[in-house]
Image: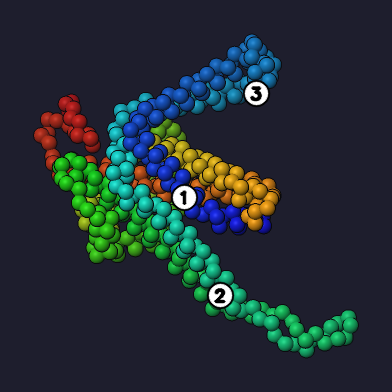
Amino acid sequence: MPNAQGFFHGARGVLPLPLASGLRSYIFLLSRIAQFLVWFSLTTSMVLSGLICGVYVLNYRTGSLSQMVGRPEGSWVDLVNAAGSGAVFILLFCQIQYIRDRIDRGVLILEDGCRCIVSTPNLSLLPLWTSAFRLYLLVWCGAVVLLLFSSELHHSVSLATHNHYGADDPWSFSISFPPEKFAMMGFVVLAVYWFLMVDTASGSFIYYFFGQLFQLQTQTGAQKSSCRLMKAYCMLAFYHGGSVILAGFLTMFLWPAHLILGTIDDASSGPLGCIIESICCFLQLYEEWLAPLDLDTLQDISLQGMAYFEASNHLKKNNLSAEVRVLSTQIRFFQLAGFALAGALGYLTTMLVLQSPEYKEASSPHYVSQSKMPIHLVGAGLGLWCSLPFMRVFHLVSEGILYAKYVERQRQPKPPELGFDILGHHYDCC
C-alpha cells in the first residue's frame, strides 16, 4: 500500500501507549477479581454447554425449536450436536470437581503475582524492551543473511554466442555460491536463535526472581529494596550466567518435546488420564529425562543458587506438578483473554488514528486512499506481538511465588500431627 508507510511513520509513537496501558490495566484487574473471573468463566461454560445440549435434545424429540435450530424433528445432526455439547458439559463438571480444592489456591497465587507486577514499575517496562530488542535482532539477522547471499551475485562479462541470432551477448548473469556461504548463513541463524533462547531464559530467571523476592518480603515483612531489576541482572551475570546460557542452549532443541509431550502430560492428570497414558508410551520417558530440563529449573537456581543439573534433579523430586497444572490452566485462560484484548486495542488504535485529517483528507501527503483493513490487521498483529511478553510475565511471576511458598514450607517444618498445604493452611492428618 503506497501510503501505509507514511501512516506507520506518523503512528509509531501512538500504538505502544494504549497497548501498554491497556495490558497493565488488565493485569491490575486480575490482581483484584481473578477469583471471580475464574469461577464465573468455568460455571458459565458448563451451564451454557448443558443448555445447548438440552436445546438440541428437545428439538430432536419434538421439533419445537426448528425455527431457531434450522432443522426439523428427528434430525441426526441435532443428536450429534447434543452428544458433543453433553460431553463438554460432563468433562467440565468432572474437571471442576477434580481441581475444585486447588482452584482457589491457584487464584490467590495468581492475584499475588499480578500485585507483584503492579507494584514493580520495572516489570511493566521490561516486556516492551524485550519485544523491541527481539524485533531488532530478527531484522538484523535477516539483513545479515541477505547480505551474505547477495555478496555472491555477480554480473560478469561473457562472449557467449546466442544460439538463434548468432550475436555476442556481452553481459550474462551468473551465480557462484560456495558451500562456505551456506555454512556462514547457518551459523548466523543458529547464533541468533541461541541468543534469543538465552534471552528467554534470562527473562524467565528475572521474573522468577521477582516473584520469589515478592513472596519472601511479603512473608517476612522486610522492606523492599531499590534498584531490584539492576541487582537481579548483576546477580544473573556474576553467579548464574553459565546456567542461563546452558538453559537457553537446551531449550533450542527440547522445546518441541516440552510443547507436545508436556501438553499431553498435563492432560493425563485430568479425567482422561488413563486413556492418554495408555495411548502415549513416551510419557514416562519424558517425565524421567526431559521434563526436568525445562526453564522451570531456573527457579531453584534463582532461589537456592544451585547448578543447572543439580537444580533439575532437585525440581524432579519436588511434587509440585498438580499445583502447577492448576495454576497453568487458569493462566492460559487469562492469557487468551489478554491476547484478544491486545489485538482489539491494536485494531481500534489504528482505526482511530486513520480518522485524523492527516490520513483522511485527500490533500494530505499521507492520505490513505486504498482499503484500510490491511492497516487495521497490521495494528492488531502489532498488538499481539507486544502482548506476548506481557502475558508471559504474570505466568512466570506467579510460578515463582508458588515455588517460594513451597520451599518456605520445607525450610520451616511443622509438627507431624499437622499437615500444611502450600499456602500454609493446616489440617488434621488422618
Judging by the rendered image, the residue that carries numbered circle 3 is: 77
Query: For residue 16, which numbered disc appears in the image?
Result: 1
Judging by the rendered image, the residue that carries numbered circle 2 is: 148
**Residue 281 can be seen in this image:** no
The foreground one among 216 and 26 is 26
Amino acid type of disc 3? Val
Q: Secondary structure at mark 2?
A: helix
Work out which quarter of the rendered image holds the N terminus and state it. bottom right
Query: For residue 26, which numbered disc appears in the image?
Result: none
- Left or right of 56 in this view: 264: left
Can you give x and y, in whole percent of width and height, for residue 116 in the image? Answer: 29, 43
| CA separation in Å, label 3 and label 1 | 47 Å
Residues at discs 2 and 1 in contact (Cβ within 8 Å): no
Work out which quarter of the rendered image holds the C terminus and state it. top left
- Residue at left offset 80%, top offset 85%: 169
The foreground one among 9 and 422 is 9
Amino acid type of disc 2? Leu
- Give the mark, 3 or 1, whose residue is nearer the N terminus: 1
Q: Secondary structure at mark 1?
A: helix
Label 3 neighbour load within 10 Å: few <14, some 14-19, many 20+: few
| CA separation in Å, label 2 and label 3 | 58 Å
- Residue at left offset 23%, top offset 48%: 213
- Left or right of 415 in this view: 226: right
Residues at discs 2 and 3 in contact (Cβ within 8 Å): no
Would you place residue 23 above or below residue 243 in this image? above
